[in-house]
Amino acid sequence: MTTASKQVGPVQRAARTADSPKGIPADVVGGQPPSAPCEMPMPATNSTTTRSAMTMKEIASLDNLKQAWKQVAANKGAPGPDGQSIDDLRICIDEVLPEVQRSLLEGDYRPGQIRRVWIPKAGGQRGLGIPDVIDRLVQQAVHQVLSPNYEPSFHRNSHGFRPNHSCHTAIRAAQEYIDDGYEWVVDIDLAKFFDRIPHDRLVSRLQQRVTDPDVIRLIRHMLKAKVVMPDGVVVSTEEGAPQGGPLSPLLSNVVLDELDTELDRRGHRFVRYADDCNIYVRSQRAGHRVMASVTKFIEGRMRLKVNKDKSAVARPHQRHFLGFRLRRMPWEEDVEVLLSKRSVERIHTRIKELTPRNWGGSLRDCLLRVNQYLRGWFGFFKICTPAEDKLLGRIDAHIRRRLRAIVLKQWRRKRTIARRLIRLGIKPRTAWRAVYDGSRSWWALSRSPAVSRALRNAYFAERGLFSLQAAWRQFQEVVNAPKQLQLPI
């Protein structure tokens, strides 16, 4: 047992990955590289020029491994099957990295198992694969060498998991196609894409660019890593690249770049974000023709599966794309960016969870929870156009009503409620009548005019409640502010 393994402890393995005779302590999760800022993509170069040879020597260099560790540690994440955390590995990282380097260069590194985690999504669950920390470090090291070589050749309309691309740039590109008159969308949904990636086709595409057999062998081992299910059952992996590791987003783009190339060759206007692909056409008839031909290519050539129940040819405002729907009215020039029905349902569900009627903490603690969620939500959905201003106001109003119900519950007795309302400026007769007029629940009472005036919008604003409508209007002022003309001196 080496010093490194004694320091790590929980897994009893010195410089070892799960199945490796000479690996290292494992415990990495951190998932995917950080999302890119919301900028418009640069034009596609489609260049095949590589920046490096993409060799094992590059991957295993100490500088690359140290940078990979910094990224994995910054991403944090839960432990893998071996139970090791980021903090466990941090204690002995200086001893571990040279062992990782040696193991990679000598070819005896073997990835450990992957822990399967199910997270909820619309209509079901999404499976995530959480590797050990050490395995995430190695995946990140591979990603740092491969990504700069592949990235310049990816299509400009591929927006997922790429620098200077995001959901926002994908929506902006879709707006442009609709504005150009392509007002029908072929919405293609790939069924369980990450779980069905054919390993042989993926490796074949990698071999077109990666000439070092040791790198290919390493990626094969990563793809074949066994999966530990929530009930403890260990299953082998014959296909797929589970989401959750730093390398899977890049591998998914390598696979789907074949689709991008084919769509571009056919002259289609399309936008793709990971496995969500929308193709924009001028008519419904053309849409059905494109749906049939592209489905044939995906299932026949790429050996993937199109989910026919979730795929459709429709108007853009009828489809959910990255949380939004796009609409262009005949009398309007601009293409509107609206919240999809699913996004509205999700925020209402989440607000209900954050403001339960049995909330036992302080109003301040409740506001902190709500604000944290609303700020994150707004950061993503702030690109909505003015048509959603009133909807944001209604969401704000619903949040305030739920908070009013919590405040009333904390005041408890009707006598206390009436006195508090009077203290907040309500006339005594109005306050007593509002409280004692029939048997009313806190939820019903929260909607009464007297309570709404006492616990007015300013009451919650003074206590720091984040307003979606106010933030959106402020954001629009900044976006639409005229730029000052710069004159040469």
Image: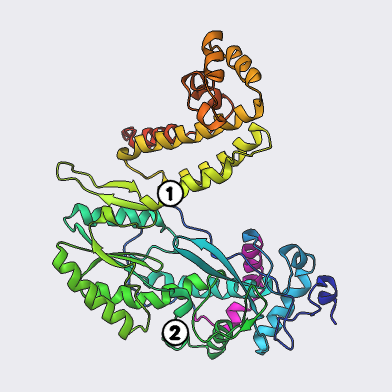
Quarter-of-image position of residue 26: bottom right
Q: Tell me the residue that label 1 is attached to.
A: 345
Mark 2 packing: few (<14 Cα in 10 Å), some, or many (20+)?
Answer: some
Find residue 468 and report its horizontal and vertical position in percent.
45, 36
Quarter-of-image position of residue 81: bottom right
The region drawn magenta spans: 53-73
Find residue 454 and report its horizontal and vertical position in percent.
53, 18
Q: Camera-side residue: 37 or 46?
A: 37
The local secondary structure at tag 2 comes to: loop
Residue 51 shows up from this direction = no
Relative to 191, is 10 on the left or the right?
A: right
- 64 in the magenta segment: yes
Mark 1 packing: few (<14 Cα in 10 Å), some, or many (20+)?
Answer: few
Amino acid on which the number 1 mark rests in the picture: Glu
* Vertical comparison of 139 with 383: above or below: below
* Residue at 77% from the left image edge and 70% from the top image edge: 94
- Mark earlier in primary sequence (1, 2): 2
* Residue at 15% from the left image edge and 41% from the top image edge: 331
Find residue 56 and report its horizontal and vertical position in percent.
58, 83
Q: Nearer the viewer, mark 1 or mark 2?
A: 1
Q: Tell me the residue that label 2 is attached to.
A: 198
Amino acid on which the number 2 mark rests in the picture: Pro
Find residue 59 and report its horizontal and vertical position in percent.
59, 78
Magenta stretch, main secondary structure, is helix
Point out the image quarter for the N terminus: bottom right
* Residue at 15% from the left image edge and 45% from the top image edge: 330
The local secondary structure at tag 1 comes to: helix
* Residue at 35% from the left image edge and 83% from the top image edge: 302
